[in-house]
Amino acid sequence: MEAQQGHDLHLNLPAGHWQALQRHCEQSGETRSAVVRKALADYLDLDHHTLWQLSTSTAVVEGVFGGALQVKDLIDHGDFGLGTFEQLDGEGILLDGVCWQARADGSLIKAPPDEAIPFWVATHFQAERKIGVTDIGSIEDLGARIDRSIEDLGARIDPLRPGANLFVAIKIKGLFEQVEMRTVSRVPEGVGLLEASTNQSVVCIEKVSGTLVGFWSPAHTTSLNIPGYHFHFLADDHSSGGHVLDLKADSLEIELDFQSNLRLALPETKQFLEADLSNDISEQLHKAETKPQESAGDSADLNDG
């Protein structure tokens, strides 16, 4: 898949339109570009602020790893996202319309268009707000800073979309002092996520420029997604990538895109249709998403609780 490039649009607006646009931006905190994009999307009946998701976290925990769609289908639903591949064959990163596959052997490749996928989250990323943070000592520290920003910015962007109950797509760029990542190895059918997470490769790279591709999901969506923060990393030189366990950085640029719409695509595979998805997966999901041999307080992913 080729990278999806943006396009500049120069408008000649009447004075009344310009003044109304300026007032709206001052009151809401939105950029002029964000307002125009949303207005065009509404007029043209296009998806915006829409999170597209294939399958559910419950299905993943229960070991439903069979492919339901292919990588080439992702581009119809977004240019930014994360997920995994059939039977957990690596960590997936979708950035600028290109899908990357980070495998447990340390390799990072452009995912083949016909590669099967069981679980993905994607969106057409359009930053509503940009902020900078400095002196990040850990991924928990980074999460706390983003929390404060979301709480503040969410109220100013749109009072109808409070930050605590909406999905948020998050793109973070910068020079990282350290990034600790994991990739899960391909597993046979019948293995659940908790067991699969014991067979993973963990690496720590230093002094690397790259991008975090992530989402924040509300606590009320546990059965659908991973609550709290979930990040995958892609190095700028495409030398490495994976699921982020921890990080350190001096200065990062953060872009936030609030998602008020959810489109859920449920697999129609035999494995999904016959799976028991009625169990409470909270504990298993938490254990699978924490650092190996560490306590719950040292969670690999950022969680609110």
Image (cartoon, rainbow, N blue to C red):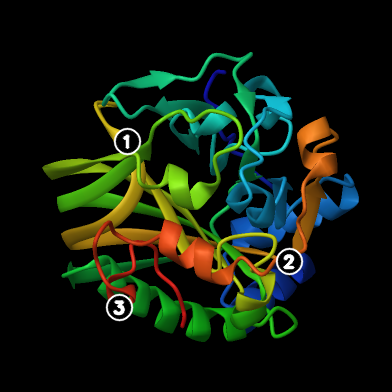
Residue under circle 2? 260
Q: CA distance from mark 2 to mark 1?
A: 28 Å
Specify the amino acid type for callout 2. Answer: Ser
Q: Residue at x 33, y 51 (%)?
A: 244
Q: Nearer the viewer, residue 301 or 152?
A: 301
In front of the other: label 2 or label 1?
1
Specify the amino acid type for callout 1. Answer: Gly
Q: Position of residue 45 (x, y in %)?
A: 89, 47
Residue under circle 3? 297
Element type where label 2 sits in the image: loop
Q: Residue at x 50, y 20 (%)?
A: 111
Mark carried by residue 241: 1
Q: Position of residue 99 (x, y in %)?
A: 51, 27
Q: Position of residue 32 (x, y in %)?
A: 61, 62
Mark 2: give few (<14), some (14-19) or many (20+) Cα within 10 Å: some
In front of the other: label 1 or label 3?
3
76 relative to 250, above or below: above
Q: Position of residue 274 (x, y in %)?
A: 83, 42
Mark before the other along the chain sequence, 3 or 2:
2
Specify the amino acid type for callout 3. Answer: Gly
Q: CA distance from mark 3 to mark 2?
A: 30 Å
Q: Picture quarter containing residue 278?
A: bottom right
Q: Picture quarter containing residue 16?
A: bottom right
